[in-house]
Image (cartoon, rainbow, N blue to C red):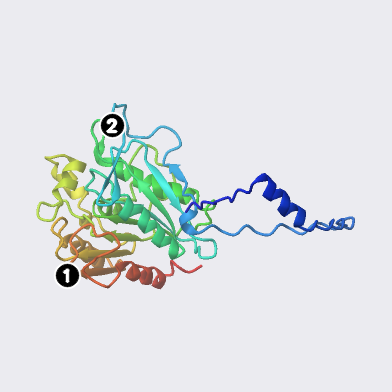
Amino acid sequence: MKKTTFLLALSFGAAQAVLAQAPRPAKPAPRVTPDKTPLPPPAPVPEAPLDEVPHPVLPLYSGSVPNSKPSNLQETSVTENGGPRVATVLQPTLTVYLPPRDKANGTSVVICPGGGYARLAIGHEGYDVAKRLNEMGVAAFVLKYRLPNGQTQPDPSIAPLLDAQQALRLVREQAAKYNLNPERIGLMGFSAGGHLAATAGTHFAKPVGVSPGPTSVRPAFLMLIYPVISFSDSLMHKGSRNNLLGDVPAADQVRLYSNELQVTAQTPPTFLVHAEDDKVVPVQNSLVFYQALHRHNVPAEMHLYPQGGHGFGMNNKTTKDQWVERLQNWLDANGWLTK
């Protein structure tokens, strides 16, 4: 927060009078420093409050963006329901939120905002969540990923996953720079961002793209908040499926991106949150994913609320219970908040 300083101006005559009455400071004694005795180190600069620390924005790719083609489209950003919404992402990025040094525990999370694969609710499902994770000592990286678009991508179906996997790869490769544990990088997603996170958490064995490199893209854990999971006709969120796969998707693509069918024993431990009255993404999406995890003996925790609808972010106004506190307990119980 900027501070404004008001200066009291004195007239020239008044200033002279004040100066005449003020005692002259004594001349300081000369400082003597013995030979070969080093001066004391400067006092450490105190850390700025968390909300005043600048948050670097990292390009996801160092060179050209893979799976992209020239177009006349430009990224757009609007404010809806009090928060920013981004669309037509051409240059994917990671916005870095680091916890105070005295709280940092080495764990990090890549956050995938939702928006039906048509836009990104990057405020309440991105930046706000990153600040809350910082309070837990967790570093957060808000992913502005590309949304499927045939005008800018040769294969729109892989563009979001390509970016999510590259985000995991980039954080892992730069873990030392940010004092992070490369084995404690989680992935979090809301709504369609939850579908993206679940896809990354079940498709890591065969990374998409050309020459992906040796760095692992497996997240250590998943956090899926009112997620789109299935693209089956009975469970799908139609907008998410159509935006990613087209209006008439092939059956094999529907199965590939129905992530409850892709769970294995290697799927990361998962935390799930959903409201039972969600009319946008049926709660059965979380239920079938939990059941698949249970069948494969993958540790999972799920919190269902009777009400809350869809898109509530961190604040389900129908209950005093805060799911983010349940998340903190889960992270702590699994050792991810241990320094």
Q: Quadrant of residue 292?
A: bottom left
What amino acid is labelled 1 in the image?
A: Pro
Q: Position of residue 226 (x, y in %)?
A: 23, 59
Identify the residue under disc 2.
152
How packed mark 2 is, by other alpha carbons closer than 10 Å (few <14, some 14-19, many 20 or more), is many
- Does residue 238 appear in this view? yes
- Does residue 215 appear in this view? no
Q: Position of residue 45 (x, y in %)?
A: 62, 57
Q: Position of residue 40 (x, y in %)?
A: 77, 59
Q: Which residue is situated farthest in the right direction here?
A: 35
Pick whichever, 104 or 182, lies toward us.
Answer: 104
Q: Which residue is situated farthest in the left direction here?
A: 234
Q: Position of residue 255 (x, y in %)?
A: 18, 49
Identify the residue under disc 1.
306
- Circles 1 and 2, Cβ within 8 Å, touching? The answer is no
Pick whichever, 13 or 262, lies toward us.
Answer: 13
Identify the residue at image location x=18%, y=44%: 253
N-term-proximal mark, 1 vs 2: 2
For residue 226, above or below residue 325: above
Identify the residue at image location x=10%, y=51%: 233
